[in-house]
Amino acid sequence: MAGDTELIQIVDAALAAAAAKAGAWLKCRPGCSECCLGAFEISGLDADRLRRGLLRLAEREPERAARVRVRAIGAADRMRSRYPADTANRMLAEAAGDDEPCPALDPAAGTCDLYESRPLTCRTFGPAIRSGDAVGTCELCFPGATEEEIAACAVELDSDALELPFLLEVSGGQPAAPTVVALALGQHQ
């Protein structure tokens, strides 16, 4: 997936620049998992990357991969029971406040078991990102910073626009509907 590799390189480079600008303002560290709770939309490209990451993890650390799969299946089953029809869309629309942990989150360590394969949303959460006129950041980062200080740390990044050509390329022009991590990884085998 050369296109996905290129996309990840672009996004990671922008985020590394944002992290360097933010310095001590950036509070994202292993063990902080506030952004790993609740359902969030991921693309088909993200889902494929996660599934490939889980397969690689299974080759290196089968027990760890099995724990991810068990968490994913459990989360997917809970979602399906609460939202039996049109699961991904209803979950995203109706469960915004849900605090279901991401299945890739190791609950003991507070780290991502699929970090290298994580979705774009996960990659872009935390540092100050400017998309158009808006600057977004994690609410835990930049404590006490002024809007001007945050804006000075922001990098311009529209990950959705960057991702679209790659999504169209791998899908033959018709991108898959968005999903959530649990549904991407929680398929019964």
Image (cartoon, rainbow, N blue to C red):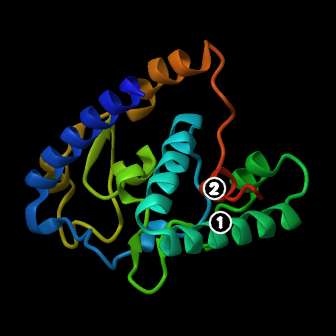
Q: Seen from this angle, which residue lies furthest right?
A: 85
Instruction: Name the quarter where the N terminus is drawn.
Output: top left
Could you tell me which residue is drawn at 54 percent across and 17 percent down? 168
From this view, report whether residue 96 is shown above or below residue 177: below
Q: Position of residue 25 (x, y in %)?
A: 15, 66
Residue nearest the viewer, comparing 49 with 27? 49
- Is residue 30 shown above or below 162? below
Q: Residue at x 46, y 51 (%)?
A: 53
Q: Which residue is mark 1?
A: 72
- Asked which secondary structure carries label 1, the reply is helix
Q: Determine whether label 2 and label 1 are within 8 Å by CB.
A: yes
Above or below for 78 versus 187 = below
Q: For this view, does 70 lie left or right of residue 125?
A: right
Which residue lies under the disc numbered 2?
185
Crowding at dot 2, Cα within 10 Å, few <14 / some 14-19 / many 20+, comes out as many
Name above or below for residue 171 compared with residue 78: above
The answer to whether residue 40 is left or right of residue 20 is: right
142 lies left or right of 163: left
Q: Is residue 100 visible?
A: yes
Type of amino acid at the residue the image marks with label 1: Ala
Residue at disc 2, secondary structure: helix
- The quarter of the picture where the C terminus appears is bottom right
Find the distance from the CA under tag 2 to the CA under tag 1: 6 Å
Residue 59: % across, % down: 46, 59
Q: Quadrant of residue 174?
A: top right
Circle 1 packing at 10 Å, graded few (<14), some (14-19), many (20+), is many
**Do we see residue 132 in this rendering?**
no
